[in-house]
Amino acid sequence: MADETSVQNSQYNQNDLPELLKQYYKRIFPYKLYYQWLSYGEVVSPKYFSHREFSFTLKDDIYIRYQSFSDQKDMEKEIQKRCPYKIDIGAVFSQKPKDNKSTKTRNFHAEEKELVFDIDMTDYDEVRTCCSGASICKRCWPFMIVAMKIVDKALKEDFDFEHRLWVYSGRRGVHCWVCDETARKLSQASRSAIAEYLSVIKGGENQVKKVHLSSKLHPSLSRASKILENYFPLLMLDYQEILSSKETWKNVLALVPDENILFAINMMYYFLIFYRFLPFEQRWEDLETELNDPKKKSCREEIMFQYCYPRLDVNVTKGLNHLLKSPFCIHPKTGRVCVPIDIGRVDEFDPFAVPTISQLCEEIDDIGRNAATDENQPSQTPKGYKSALLETSMKVFETFLLKLDVENQERLKQEKNEREKTTEW
Amino acid sequence: MDFSGNFRSKVKQEAESHSRLQMYKVPPEHKISLEDFETIATERLKLLRDVETFGIRRKKDSDEYSTAMWTSLRKYLDYTYSTDDQKMAKNKHNIDKRRKESENDNTSHFILRLAYCRSEELRRWFITQEVDLFKFRFNFEAENFENIEKFLEENSLKYTPISKEERNERLSKLACADYKMVESNVKMINYYKVHFTEALDLVRSRKVYLEKGYAYVPRDGLVSIISNCFRVHLSHALALTARSLPYLEEDERLLPRLTSLSRQYLGQGYNSKKEMPGGKITLGQIDSLSKTSFPLCMRQLHEALRRDHHLKHGGRLQYGLFIKGIGLTLEEALMFWRSEFTKIMEVDKFDKGYAYNVRHSFGKEGKRTDYTPYSCMKIIMSNHPGQGDYHGCPFRHYDADILRQKLVAYGVPHPAIKEIQELVKDSHYQLACARYFEVTHKVSLPHADAINHPNKYVEESRRVHEQLSTGTIKQEPLASTSIAHIAGSGGIKTERVTQSSSQTSFSSTTADDVINYDVTMDDDLDEGALESMDAMGY
């Protein structure tokens, strides 16, 4: 896999990572909120939390699965002891995952997990012209914005999921954690159906045309298409310049069905003769006019969908047992924190402005130093320390948790009522 | 299994109501001779095998599919072609026939439950086929909607249509959710509002309107909801049966019969321990073999691997199990993968990220299951290739144009390419592959079903090459063969040939080699471990 990346920070150096991680896990990682999230309201006896699988990736890709913690304190202790390069969150199991060796495998199985989505920029390589592989830039990031908007709307309006946490993966993609109780309890079959429902682009390396739409768009797709319309001109025509070179123009024409070979030849000819002297909006307009033909049915939409519609890594969503990188991890290659994204203001989110671990550690050192000189104290983390760099991200997380807590309390009340009923019997 | 009399009255009711659709909630309680036991079970098994074959060969909403299904239903379940119950009821003979028919249906279903509850893979296969069968029968009965209503009532499946107002508020959206529907039609039919998890088939294929977690299912979509109930019920029942099976196993007469029944479906399974014609394949031969003896799907994977020095997860599984199937040892397989992957990554990274998976597929890690290579059906039906993937079946998953280019590049003559394209167009992917075999080997295959597993393809190819070199057989100029004829001669005839051939393969699997087939689950490949490796970014 390519290691080069344009998301680089001059201050972050991979070699410092072990030392920085120690600091980060000791002084910055938001254990309290993190624990509040994953315990889902069960503060006293956190059965849900203690049955959750975590897995650590240590230095040199040493990978430990089936970690679990009895409570926040235990988690803090383990994380600080191991200083993992990466933390993954897995499912909630029938037994404590760390006991899985001692319990019979028969009884050890994944029971619940958030419904998760993983959108990775590498899956856009066939349509992006600016970067490839692990790198991203300002010209391709809007792919993620479009993807988040479309998936988020569908999750909310079609499936009625309220508690959706969007997270930047630290390098080239985004994750979504759907935390509603109903979502956590979904069967594998339901997860797979949802993933398919949200997948429009289908086909491997040997299929060129990957989107086939019927002349009437499904309500979910027509909602998506409105979003696509908004972004397509800027993202595809301007940023990605898909109508600007002979090669990319040919790729677009290849999506018009076979029967119209003559059409493709003509369009190619037009391009060579005079399109290249026109502004790109004009070229697109012209192509649209050409496509406005009942024989070519929904070709215009199909082109837009194939270029911009979200490309989910469906396997991540389908598997109940699939691990996904935890929020607030550090991406080892970029040093950036996996921060929550405010989906309401997703257009403003700038992946290149996400703080790196070096910046965070520097910030806290500064605060520590100031505190030390001011009040003559050892340079330790001041109580109630809040990172200014992480402030907006933490607010997003807190708002999410506040809303989630309402559901948690309701659920716990209900469970309590049911318990009392059964004891009365 | 509860064979006690608790349900006696219910059984009676069911028999008298004549509803031919069943949820199979009540086990049979009559006596049955061992001979009948075996016969009706085998008949149903043949039916289910047909269901599987037809499902893959034909589009499920095509006339071809329904004709084929009907022939089998009549043949194996003695099914009568009529949905008009009242007309049927006028004749005493008909009533008796119907009763016998539903009794056999019920009994054979329950026998196969016993045989197919015993492993995850068997259960999955059985459920898939039974659900497909149920769907077909449901759709057929739905021609007379009263039958469906009766069935729903009998099984206390209560679905109330939404009110006119609720429906009219969503007219255009409901119409758009189904491409066959127009707004004026929406006004005419009933819609049912169910939680989306009850209509997963429709959700998956985006054929239903979703709003706030609820699916608005038109009357025609009811089959999807009900078959989902059917699936859930059956899956639960199989789990229960599996748990109580040990108590039954003391019966010396039943056990061997059930075991043999459950083995029979594995017609397309593949046992790698068999002798490979032309001697053991070694690592050094793979490159040349990929050109002469690999099926197109594996040749593609091989070329992609040699070119990119990498394959994604789906490709590694399909190709990895295949090369294990042709007889490479674990050490050879490790060497094979390592030599390619390390051209783009450190040896260390390979050993940590990928070697585990290779060992795992040989049953040396995790659950220690010795996984079987994928059959054509599995490759065609499951795990569609996505971005960056080269796995799948070229005849199924490639653009027509790209497939043509490949065939041209591999020297397939023009007329044969045309034939192959025709076969592909009609969804005869395996026949297309068989034709590809014939033209590349310049021989004709004994029967159309000869290619149903990539590993069988290699074996067959090696056999042909061996026979050619010893002069046992001769090449034909450009074999114009069975397959071309079959496909050219229209639906009914195609049906006849494929059926008889599927029968042959059925009886052949009951022969001695069946004992070797491993009953393994190849689907779940310890998903957690493998996928997590993928999730880790490898």
Image (cartoon, rainbow, N blue to C red):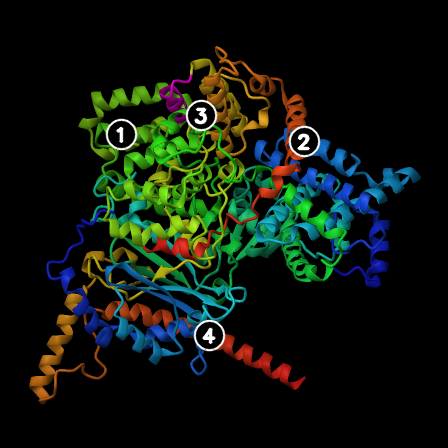
- Disc 2 and disc 4: Cα gap in Å? 58 Å
The chain carrying label 2 is B
Tell me the amino acid under the disc marked 3: Lys
Q: Residue at x 42, y 58 (%)?
A: A322
Tell me the amino acid under the disc marked 2: Gln
State the residue lying farthest toward the right.
B92
The location of residue B273, given as percent across then percent down, is: 51, 40
Which residue is identified by label 2? B503
Q: Are discs 2 and 3 both within one chain?
A: no
Q: Are discs 2 and 4 both within one chain?
A: no
Q: Are discs 4 and 1 both within one chain?
A: yes
Question: Is disc 2 in contact with disc 4, using a CB cutoff of under 8 Å?
Answer: no
- Disc 2 and disc 1: Cα gap in Å? 52 Å
Pointer 3 local density, CA inside 10 Å: few below 14, some 14–19, many at least 20: few
The chain carrying label 1 is A
The location of residue A110, given as percent across then percent down, is: 48, 63
Which residue is identified by label 3? A295
- Disc 4 and disc 1: Cα gap in Å? 52 Å
Question: Looking at the rendering, which quadrant does residue B246 occupy?
Answer: bottom right
Q: Nearer the viewer, mark 2 or mark 1?
A: 2
- Disc 3 and disc 4: Cα gap in Å? 53 Å
Q: Are discs 3 and 4 both within one chain?
A: yes
Q: Are discs 1 and 3 both within one chain?
A: yes
* Callout 1 secondary element: helix
Which residue is identified by label 1? A249
Residue stretch rendered in magenta on the structure = B400-412
Tell me the amino acid under the disc marked 4: Asn
Quick check: is B403 in the magenta stretch?
A: yes
Residue A408: numbered disc: 4
Tell me the amino acid under the disc marked 1: Trp
Can residue B180 be seen here? yes
